[in-house]
Amino acid sequence: MTFTKEEKSWIMYDWANSVYSLIIVTAILPIYFKYVAGNAGISDADSTAFWGYASSFATLLISVSSPILGTIADYRGAKKKLFNFFAFSGMLLTLALAIVPNHSWVALLAVYVISHMGFQGANIFYDGFLVDVTTDERADAVSSYGFGFGYIGSALLFVLVMVLQVTDGFGLMGTETVTKLCFILTAVWWFAFTIPFVKNVHQNYGIEPEKHTIRRSFLRIAETIKEISRYKHIVFFLIAYFFYIDGVDTIFTMATAFGIDMGVSSDMLIIILLVVNIIAFPFTILYGRLAARFGTKPLILTAISVYIIICIYAMFMKTTVDFWIVGILVGTSQGGIQALSRSYFAKIVPKDRANEFFGFYNIFGKFSAILGPSIFAFVTQMTGQSQFGIAALILLFIIGAVLFSRVNFQATTD
């Protein structure tokens, strides 16, 4: 498939920011945080729970502002400015992780929370730009290639990070110094590959600027809520999305802490995460191609089914091999369900109000990520077993599947 310059630049941002998801959210920072917290006398179960609560708090802060930010972004010229602010703020705070004192687990969590807000905030506008760079017919493919290249791009940097971790910086650095270098590399990578997006992606849909932009934006949100009967298909999808993406994000966010609690070594976790990202690349592209043949809805339901299997299997996990199996299953479907959910939503919203609706899309997705980690953390603390925390997420996938199966695709395209 041949992509336009705008589509390529949009896809490249997934390549740019996915290193944050892998290295900061999933791999290196959780391991480093548990190390710092352990040195401070925090138990494994409690440090895992604190990581979950921090992830939930970061999500809460950006979620409550998503609808108004999305509505403001619908004004011509505003979307790119907001994207730049959040993206570059996230990069700077990622750099700041490298200067947090080694003994302060609280400060480490605080900087993580703020950097995560920048990362998630930029994604509100990045997702909204999908309607600007491509057509409905190409949306599944473009969205899938975005996630796919995000996985392979983050895997490339992750290889360097893994080498630095295993060799202690080629014998030149201590473990803590290597870890902080990984934070710096993540921020630099994120910045460098965001440049094509900043140069080439522009807002094509939107409304003309008005006086009192913020006040008018709140009024527009109120008007949309009053007219919600016009958008029943969108609301029904968002409720379903709320549940199933909650489970997806929670498994991703808590994977490393879960693995450590199972006794998987840090080096093995790094290898597993690398393999998962490599697997995710072709499978995400495959989901996009299969969606073109069989439809987006059946492929999303297929991905949800894979996650239900993961939750069931988690109850019986005991060994590193079990963790490998779960990781591979996640790799086959994580990118697919995220990419197709994004493109499905882009097809069903009014184009000139896409950012307002993507604000709701993000608040449903982000608020769901508050519930999931909290469920995981609570069940883990109550049982003392991370496996039961993962298994408890099955309810979210079942509810999401039932609700999404009731969304009429034809109705969404009218």
Image (cartoon, rainbow, N blue to C red):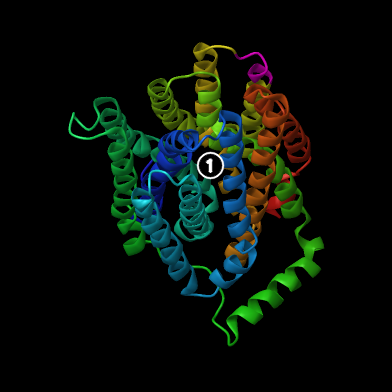
Which is nearer the eye, 366 or 381? 381
- Residue 315 within the segment the image draws in magenta: yes
Q: Quadrant of residue 232?
A: bottom right
* Residue drawn at 45 percent across, 26 percent down: 276
Using the image, determine if residue 153 lies above or below residue 117: above
Percent position (x, y) of residue 107? 47, 51
- SS of the residue under disc 1: helix
* Residue drawn at 66 percent across, 21 percent down: 309
Left or right relative to 67: residue 21: left
Left or right relative to 81: residue 230: right
Instruction: Give the residue number, with chain letter if any, for mark 1.
Output: 339
Q: Which residues are magenta?
A: 312-317
Q: Indicate the amino acid at tag 1.
A: Ala
Percent position (x, y) of residue 151? 41, 36
Left or right relative to 335: residue 348: right
The reply to whether residue 4 is visible in this rendering is no
Which is nearer the eye, 290 or 24? 24
State the residue lying farthest toward the bottom. 211
Quarter of the image that includes the C terminus = bottom right
Task: State the count of labels.
Answer: 1
Percent position (x, y) of residue 137? 53, 48
Percent position (x, y) of residue 304? 65, 31
- Residue 344 within the segment the image draws in magenta: no
The reply to whether residue 88 is visible in this rendering is yes
Quarter of the image that includes the N terminus = top left
Which is nearer the eye, 183 or 83? 183
